[in-house]
Amino acid sequence: MTQLVLSRDQAGVRTLSLNNPERLNALSGELASQLLTALQAAANDIAVRVVVLTGEGRGFCAGQDLTEVAGPLLQGQGLDLSGHLTRHYQPVIEAIRGMDKPVIAAVNGVAAGAGASLALACDLRVSSSEAQWVQIFSNIALIPDAGSTWFLPQLVDFGRAFELMSLAEKVSAQQALELGLCQQVFSADNFAEQAQAYAEQFAARPALALALTKRALNAAMTGTLSESLALEAELQQQAGESADFREGVQAFMEKRSPRWR
Ligand code: T3D
C-alpha cells in the first residue's frame, strides 16, 4: 500500500505530511482515509503534544483529486458527492477539531478547494511565503465544502468570504496574514524548520490547559455567552485539579520556570 501520509515525530510534535506530490497532494478517498487514521493515532498517543499538517513537494493540498471523479462524471454517471463528503471529508475535519491537542496547518504551497478547507479546519495556520490560498471550488462550478462555509466567515467577514469563494481569487501568503487566514508567514527557504519551531512552542506549554482551551473555544463558536460561561467554569475545575496547575502556581511563588508534566 502506498503511504499517502508520512509521519515524523520530533520534540512532542507529530508532523503528518500529505504524500501525493505529483498531484499537489490532491485528496483521493484513500489519502483522506489514511489521513483520518493518522489523525486518530496522533490523538491517542500521549507522547504527541502537537500535530502539524503539511504537504510533500511544492503543494499543501489541491483539494479533491479530480482524476477520481473525471472518469464517471465525463461518462455521464451521477456522482454521490454528498456521500463522498460525509464518508471521507467530514470525519477528517471532525478529527482535527475534536482532537484535544493543537493542530497546526503548515501550508507549504498551494492550498486549494478542500485543501484550503483542511487548513482552515486546523486550530492555527502558518504559511510559506510562496504559498497561495484559493477557494477554488467555483472554478469547477462546485460550492465550498469540507467546512469552508463555516470556517472562512469566522475569519473574514461574510462579504469577503463570499467574494473569495465566488471569484476563486488567489490569496498570497501576505494577504492571508492580513486577512487573518494564517497567524504567521515564514520564508520558503527554511519553512519546515520554522514551522517545527513554532509548533514546539505549543508543545512546551501545559497540555491539559491547551486541550481544555481548545474545547472551550470550539464550544464558544456555536454557543451562547451563558453556555460559554458555564463550560468555562466546568473546564476550569478540571484544569485546576491538574498537577500542572499546582506546579504553575508553585513555580510562580518560587520565581522559577514551571516544569510541565
Ligand atoms: O468529490 C467530491 O466530493 C467533491 C468535492 C470537492 C472538493 C474540492 O476540493 S473541489 C476543488 C478541486 N480542486 C481543484 O479544482 C484544483 C485543481 N487544480 C488547480 O486548479 C491547479 O492545479 C492549482 C491552482 C491548484 C495549482 O496550479 P499549478 O499551476 O501550480 O499546478 P498544476 O500544473 O496545475 O498542477 C500540477 C499537477 O498536479 C498537474 O499534473 P500534471 O499535469 O503535472 O500531470 C495537475 O493536473 C495536478 N493536479 C492539481 N490539482 C489536482 C491535480 N490532479 C488531480 N486533482 C487535483 N485537484
Image (cartoon, rainbow, N blue to C red):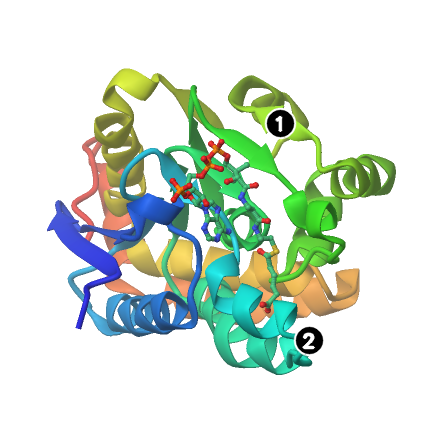
Give the residue drawn at x 47%, y 69%.
98
Depth check: give the residue in front, 118 or 210.
118
Q: Amino acid at mark 2?
A: Gly
The residue wearing badge 1 is 171
Examine the image and state in which quarter residue 181 appears: top right
Where residue 120 appears, x then y in whole percent?
Answer: 56, 48
- Which quarter of the image is occupied by the C terminus? bottom left
Q: CA distance from mark 1 to mark 2?
A: 34 Å
Give the residue drawn at x 26%, y 17%.
189
- Which quarter of the image is occupied by the N terminus? bottom left
Image label count: 2
Examine the image and state in which quarter residue 170 appears: top right
Badge 1 crowding class, 10 Å Cα cut-off, few under 14, some 14 to 19, many 20 or more, is some
Residue 26: mark: none
Give the residue drawn at x 61%, y 83%.
83
Depth check: give the residue in front, 201 or 30.
30
- Toward the right, the furthest residue is 159
Where residue 9 appears, x then y in whole percent?
Answer: 13, 52
Give the label, 1 or 2, closer to the camera: 2
135 versus 206 height, above or below: above
Label 1 sits on a secondary structure element that is strand
Q: Amino acid at mark 1?
A: Val
Depth check: give the residue in front, 20 or 144.
20
Give the residue drawn at x 30%, y 70%.
34
Label 2 sits on a secondary structure element that is loop
The residue wearing badge 2 is 76
